[in-house]
Image (tube, rainbow, N blue to C red):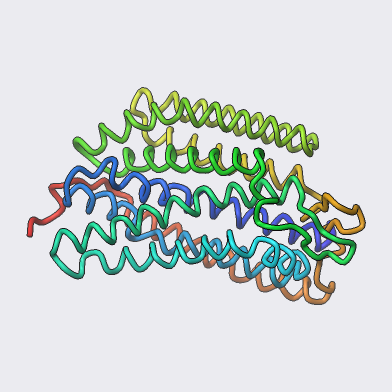
Amino acid sequence: MELTTVWFLLVAVLFTGYFVLEGFDFGVGMLLPVLGRDDRERRVLINTIGPVWDGNEVWLITAGGAMFAAFPEWYATLFSGFYLPLLLILLALIARGVAFEYRHKRPEAAWKRRWDRAIFWGSLLPAVLWGVAFANILRGVPLTADHEYAGGLLDLLHPYALLGGATTLALFLTHGAVFIALKTVGDVRERAGALAVRLGVVTAVLAVAFLTWTLAIRSSAAAVVLAVGAALALVGGLAAARVRREGWAFTGTAVAIGLAVATLFAALFPNVLPSTLDAAGTLTAANAASTPYTLKIMTWVAVVFTPIVLAYQGWTYWVFRKRIGVAHIPRH
């Protein structure tokens, strides 16, 4: 297998891991004002992701770094053409991270409400904009023969992209609700489980519509198999949520998101950013890649450090695996 293909697969794996892991904590952030009826319940929700949310974002940093080093032409064109959406995602993530750290610094209710709003919007904006961005990557954008983006912001907001944003929003909300049900006890757990089932119906409709449209735009045998697998996993996860089997429900939504992202990359390959203007402007894994020597050095670095990072993150999830509830939150 060529190193360009290896690194395309690695970038796909990194983004898949990011959406699976960050997806549920985006969901928790968006559900903060819905499931948190008072400050103690909101603190329970925040504490479910407190030990892991920043580790989940490492997947995005690593994916961006891998794209920059392995496919600099893809990185440069993508970040110039998608500058405003990606900047909004970055600002939202910054505001969200600050909110997690600052919310508990003062006891006033007004102070906490402001940071709760930052967590909500800092979770909602990326949840929508990532779907819009990846829908555009797969469909293609106006690129000249020199790989320069020739469109504007409105070129990114077509119906397929908006459906992609709605789909990721619904998926992350459902994934987050299932995670809350998995990680909590008492009333919060019951409300989260019931909400996950209701959200799941809308999510299933949007996901099937988006994946069907995706395969109509660009497809491969692998993409079809992955899309079917994603649909089955989502249905299985929702069925488990209905009977309150939260572990299996979370596994189902996690696998569904992972296979859905894998579907997009499988349908895209060997392209990395198609052009809707000129076929000569299409970026592929071959013409967007770094030199073979660079890819070779990067491969050895990945072989050494990837298992270490995975082991550390797995250990973090194991240590903080227990359920929590309002009884674990002191009054003050």
Q: Quadrant of the C terminus?
A: bottom left
Q: Position of residue 6 (x, y in %)?
A: 76, 59
Give the farthest residue toward the right.
280
Residue 213 as seen in the image, left or right of residue 94:
right
**Does 151 sit above or below residue 244?**
below
Q: Position of residue 301 (x, y in %)?
A: 66, 73
Identify the residue at horizontal 37%, vertical 34% (top origin).
Answer: 246
Is residue 30 or residue 221 the one in the foreground?
A: 30
Is residue 111 or residue 212 the one in the foreground?
A: 111
Is residue 184 or residue 279 the one in the foreground?
A: 279
Is residue 164 or residue 142 the one in the foreground?
A: 142
Residue 187 as seen in the image, left or right of residue 243:
left
Identify the residue at horizontal 63%, vertical 52% (top origin).
Answer: 133
Total of numbered circles in the picture?
Answer: 0
Q: Position of residue 255 (x, y in %)?
A: 54, 39
Q: Quadrant of the N terminus?
A: bottom right
Q: Position of residue 119 (x, y in %)?
A: 35, 57
Quadrant of residue 2 in the image? bottom right
Residue 29 as seen in the image, left or right of residue 74:
left
Identify the residue at horizontal 41%, vertical 46% (top origin).
Answer: 27
**Does 251 sit above or below residue 95?**
above
**Does 319 sit above or below residue 105?**
above
**Does 89 sit above or below residue 44?**
below
Quadrant of residue 299 in the image? bottom right
Identify the residue at horizontal 60%, vertical 42% (top origin).
Answer: 162
